[in-house]
């Protein structure tokens, strides 16, 4: 194949790709616009705090626990969320994964880690962090709620 033929093939393929992208956009645009309009109508009245907490309410996550955690975390803390994996807030996603995922943005600027051994703070929902066998310098429970913040001994 000559350079000219190769260039022609590339231009034809690029044109087909552009035409497909345009057709796809035109086909999905009306429904996308209706969806965005519905979402705007539903959420435009939310306060900044409402928007921050919306994911928790939508997934049945205990927002009180995360507000308690936020009150006890400091910038630069490395935290691990501990929870029994068996229970579930969201179908198909275990409780621990749900809590860890939500915490990654809600608990900023503290930093999530993947194991308790990496953490400077263990946040626990539904199980006393003392059961992890890690030495803590301080363990605080949220009243009678099953939420704990435990600072790891260094």
Image: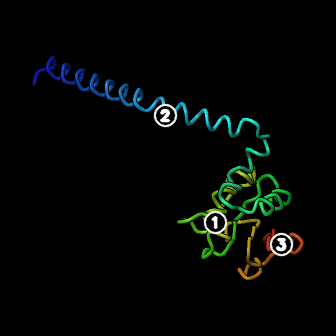
In the rendered image, residue 111, in percent from the top left (x then y), is placed at 70, 55
In 3D space, how far apart are the residues under numbered discs 2 and 3 (Cα atoms)?
44 Å
In the rendered image, residue 138, in percent from the top left (x then y), is placed at 86, 72
Label 3, residues with CA under 10 Å away: few <14, some 14-19, many ≥20: few
**Could you tell me which residue is drawn at 80 percent across and 74 percent down?**
146
Residue 104 vs residue 90, the one in the foreground: 90
Q: Which image quadrant: the C terminus?
A: bottom right
User: Which secondary structure, mark 3?
Assistant: loop
Q: Which label was assigned to residue 89?
A: 1
Contact between marks 2 and 3 (CB within 8 A): the answer is no
User: Which secondary structure, mark 1?
Assistant: loop
Label 1, residues with CA under 10 Å away: few <14, some 14-19, many ≥20: some
In the rendered image, residue 86, in percent from the top left (x then y), is placed at 60, 76
**Could you tell me which residue is drawn at 81 percent across and 75 percent down?**
136
Question: What is the quadrant of residue 95 in the picture?
Answer: bottom right
Q: Nearer the viewer, mark 2 or mark 3?
A: 2
Label 2, residues with CA under 10 Å away: few <14, some 14-19, many ≥20: few
Residue 97 vs residue 47, the one in the foreground: 47
In 3D space, how far apart are the residues under numbered discs 1 and 3 (Cα atoms)?
17 Å
The residue positioned farthest toward the left in the image shown: 1
Q: Which image quadrant: the N terminus?
A: top left
User: Which secondary structure, mark 2?
Assistant: helix
In 3D space, how far apart are the residues under numbered discs 2 and 1 (Cα atoms)?
30 Å
Q: Which label was assigned to residue 31?
A: 2
**Could you tell me which residue is drawn at 73 percent across and 82 percent down?**
131
Q: Which label was assigned to residue 145?
A: 3
From the viewer's perspective, is residue 78 above or below residue 136?
above
Which of disc 1 and disc 2 is earlier in sequence?
2
In the rendered image, residue 67, in percent from the top left (x then y), is placed at 81, 57
């Amino acid at each position: 194949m000559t350079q000219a033929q190769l260039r022609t093939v590339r231009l034809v393929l690029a044109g087909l790709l552009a035409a497909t992208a345009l057709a796809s956009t035109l086909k999905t645009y009306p429904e996308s616009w209706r969806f965005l309009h519905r979402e705007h109508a539903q959420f435009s009245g939310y306060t900044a705090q409402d928007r921050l907490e919306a994911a928790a309410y939508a997934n049945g996550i205990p927002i009180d626990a995360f507000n308690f955690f936020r009150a006890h975390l400091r910038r630069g803390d490395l935290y691990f969320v501990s929870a029994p994996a068996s229970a579930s807030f969201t179908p198909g996603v275990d409780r621990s994964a749900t809590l860890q995922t939500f915490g990654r943005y809600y608990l900023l600027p503290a930093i999530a880690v993947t194991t308790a051994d990496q953490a400077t703070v263990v946040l626990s929902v539904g199980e006393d962090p003392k059961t992890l066998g890690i030495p803590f310098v301080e363990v605080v429970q949220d009243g009678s709620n099953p939420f704990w913040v435990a600072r790891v001994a260094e």
